[in-house]
Image (cartoon, rainbow, N blue to C red):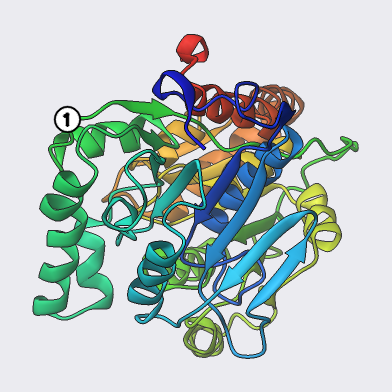
Amino acid sequence: MALSSGTVDDAERSLGGRPVPLRVAIVNWRDPWQRAAGGAELYAWRMGEQLRDRGAAVTFVTSREPGQARHEVRDGIRIVRMGGVYSRYPLVLAWLLRHRSAFDVAIDCMNGIPFLSPLALAARTKIILLVHHVHDAQFSVYFGRFLAAVGRTIEGPVAKVVYRGRPTVAVSASTARELRGRLGWRGPIYIVPNGAPTPVPRPRGYAAGSPAIVCVGRLVAHKRVHEVVAAVGRLRADHPGVHLHVVGRGEEHERLAARVRALGLDEHVTLHGYLSERAKDDLLTGADLHISASRHEGWGLSVIEAAAHGLPTVAYDVNGLRDAVRDGETGWLAAPDEDLADTVRRALKELEARGPGIRAACRAWASGFTWEASGERLHRLIRDDLDAF
């Protein structure tokens, strides 16, 4: 079944005169229901939903946690799971090779390590590489010198050769610049941002002296949630009623809990772990400020989700987060060497003086990002209709 004119257009595909759905594989290292899932998994799944809604037959190829089904259909999307932390890459590549002619399009998500799908899929398959951020130095946070060097080599020189000339999707302008500057990427790059929820705004006022602060994200080393906990400890002197709500789960949970106890912050910090979307929304709605201490982000999905609730963010002025936060309007950016507590103090003073205007600006900013618009951009890219870019 050949694709006409070398493009992927579901309106042009037919079998015996009948239209045939576009067959799309989304290859991602996790699915949204795994314990370590985060924004990258939500993004990949939302893009799958958007392509499904536009008539595509979507297969989500990913790793498998103990207890998860190997095959499942969820919300009209077929899920295929295999392999663990390291084995998922060779197993998924072998699976793609066995099904090399089964897809018209593959969205290959590179979360540091790509799946190298061009080595397995048929030459006529359109392959789009999806990158949230360049990991590079981040490999050294999790691995020793040798493995970190291997990771940087695969993400850089190896990926640049394997995906040469193929379209790449970046989630932010920062990521696009990193691809060009740090990895020497030469192929076409298109920006398809994250979406945001559309919650119903509720009236809220800032309680001076007793601010409620939220930190949302996976509890992993590079998110640096321990810095947020330490900042809250320093804030107690002038904000005795301050309370930090940490939402998320991950390998750093026990270490964070120990740090909270060591700093005597049991009455000021709550580690909620995983929360349902409704419970998380309720928490964001009632908070005064959102904080991210991460030094490595492609965008910062939690930032735009908080903004949708009228909640500004304090974050470091680093790639990705500087795209998601409009400094002085929808949040405040701290210099990498700045004390995070000082930036929070400045933010709280401004919230006390002009809170309603800041919250309105947050909601207006977030309203410009929807999963529908991002899905349409990706669909246009698949069809080689680049007017949206």
Q: Which residue is mark 1?
A: 186
Residue lying at the far front of the rendered structure:
16
The reply, left or right, for residue 320 in relation to residue 356 is left
Is 231 or 133 nearer to us in this picture? 133
Q: Indicate the position of residue 177 as horizontal and vertical percent values.
A: 25, 31
Identity of the residue drawn at 66% across and 56% down: 213
Residue 345, visible in the rendered structure:
no
Please provide percent x and percent y for residue 173: 37, 29
Measuring from the top left, give residue 247's x and y in whole percent.
Answer: 66, 67
**Quarter of the figure with residue 166:** top left
Q: Residues within 10 Å of mark 1 (few under 14, many from 20)?
A: few
For the point 51% across and 23% down, which residue is it?
A: 383
Q: Is residue 121 left or right of residue 160?
A: right
> Is 263 located above or below residue 327 in the figure?
below
Which is nearer the eye, 292 or 60?
A: 60
Residue 31 quadrant? bottom right
Left or right: 170 as drawn, with respect to 254:
left
Front residue of this view, candidates 288 and 253: 253
Give the amino acid at mark 1.
Answer: Arg
